[in-house]
Amino acid sequence: MSTNPAAESAVEQAGPAVPLPADLADERLIQHAGLGGWWSAFVNRIRGGDLGSMPVVVGLILISLFFFLQQPKFLSSFSLVSLTRFAAPLGIISLGIVLVLLLGEIDLSVGSVSGLASVVTAVQLVRHDQSLIVALLAGIVTGVAIGALYSVLFVKLGVPSFVITLAGLLGFQGLLLYVLGSQGTLNLPTDSGLVKFASGYVSGPMSYVLAALVVVLFVGSRLVGIRRRTSAGLSAPSVLGLLVKGGALAIGLLFLTWYLQQGTGRGWSYLWILFTFLVVLMDVALRKTTWGRHVFAVGGNEEAARRAGIKVSRIYTSVFVLCSTLASIGGLLAAARLTSVSQSSGTGDTNLTAIAAAVIGGTSLFGGRGSAYSAMLGIIVLQAIITGLNLLGVDSSVRFMVTGAVLLLAVAIDSVARRARSSSGRG
């Protein structure tokens, strides 16, 4: 949408032959018609294939309702706290997958990278008696180096990302075995800061302060945006609507904060707080920075982005490096939660779960559409399914089948929405 008042004025004077952009038209419809305008704008977006996060939110509500009716413990404070704590490390890995998918590429090696990074850190910490900071840096640098290697192979040699990361999946799993050596398992010191962080919780008055801070930051940032748009002569959301959203957010967060501390629940885990922080940070980077706009541009149409002067190779490099770095961070936190690393670190369904979470959360496999919150929504859905099936005592084979069905449904919805957007654009 144009940020130039003169350009917007020209659009207005051009008459019905020049339609307004969808988001600008929706904003004005809401301003002039109130609640009815909001509903009309919502219907217009749905018809245009802009489903956003609605399918996954509706799916999460239905999943939660089903498991709650089968086993009320599903929504207990203990269950919800455990769900968020177990979901956080994989969610961080999935956040990197979201970035790669936005470019229309794929990374099949995030599981192996996460396992290798955790083993490198454990070896430095336990066998070589390095400080925690040095050990953590070694693990994170491992991820950075792998991402840089991927970018060179992709940008300079033109090797497809599917082939590069498939080779990485196998190669780095072998390197993990080599670094770990003949000893199959390596226990992390239980008194290390990493393990204490992974097992820690924010509870008591501090948790309420944190919840209030989130609300203040949300409302404050949106108010700044409204003020900038108003001063530029552009349409802006109503302040009243923002205050209503802020009030709803405050009520929801404060209730959740209270509820998670009831019974055997301990409140918000440090792992979930870190994951949420990374998601918000990445969301701001994608929506508010030049780099983020370039990521969407390259994912939408690489050739058009190149002709517009975007340094496409730099975008690919930054995204591959970020993906592997986030995978290494997720692997470190997963190892800290388990207090050990082994030959199976990063294996199993780590890769597929991280990729499935990004897709189920609403990131398009075709590139150019998605958000950082896709990783959070997707991993919550998958962890909810795992938690619910475990409470019902269902065999793990059913979990894999259900996860596959949910993934297929998410991709089908994305394909239908993409077709609707194409039809709307032609019309």
Image (cartoon, rainbow, N blue to C red):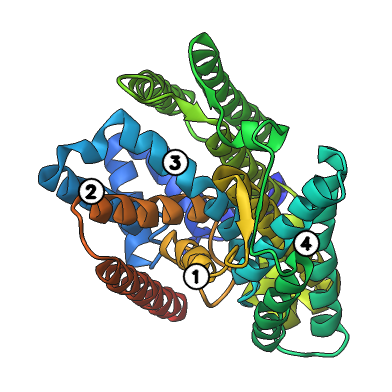
- Label 1, label 2: how far apart the Cα atoms are: 21 Å
**Residue name at image x 16 percent, y 50 percent:** 66
* Point 32% across, 58% down: residue: 55
Residue 330 lies left or right of residue 36; in this view the side is: right
Tag count: 4
Q: Mark 1, mark 4: which one is toward the viewer?
A: 1
Residue under numbered circle 1 = 348
User: Of the numbered discs in the image, which one, if any, rests on residue 391?
Assistant: 2
Measured from the top left, where is residue 419 in percent x and y?
39, 80
Residue 144 located left or right of residue 274: right
User: Which type of secondary structure does the marked residue at label 1 adopt?
Assistant: loop
Q: Mark 1 and mark 4: span between their CA atoms? A: 19 Å
Q: Quadrant of residue 292?
A: bottom right
Q: Residue 143 got which mark? A: 4
Which quarter shows the N terminus?
bottom right
Report how far apart the C-alphas of labels 3 and 1 lie in the structure.
20 Å
Q: Amino acid at mark 4?
A: Gly
Q: Nearer the viewer, mark 4 or mark 2?
A: 2
**Sequence-wise first label, 3 or 2:** 3
Q: Earlier in the sequence, mark 3 or mark 1?
A: 3
- Please say if the residues under marks 1 and 4 sit with CB atoms less than 8 Å apart: no
Amino acid identity at mark 2:
Leu
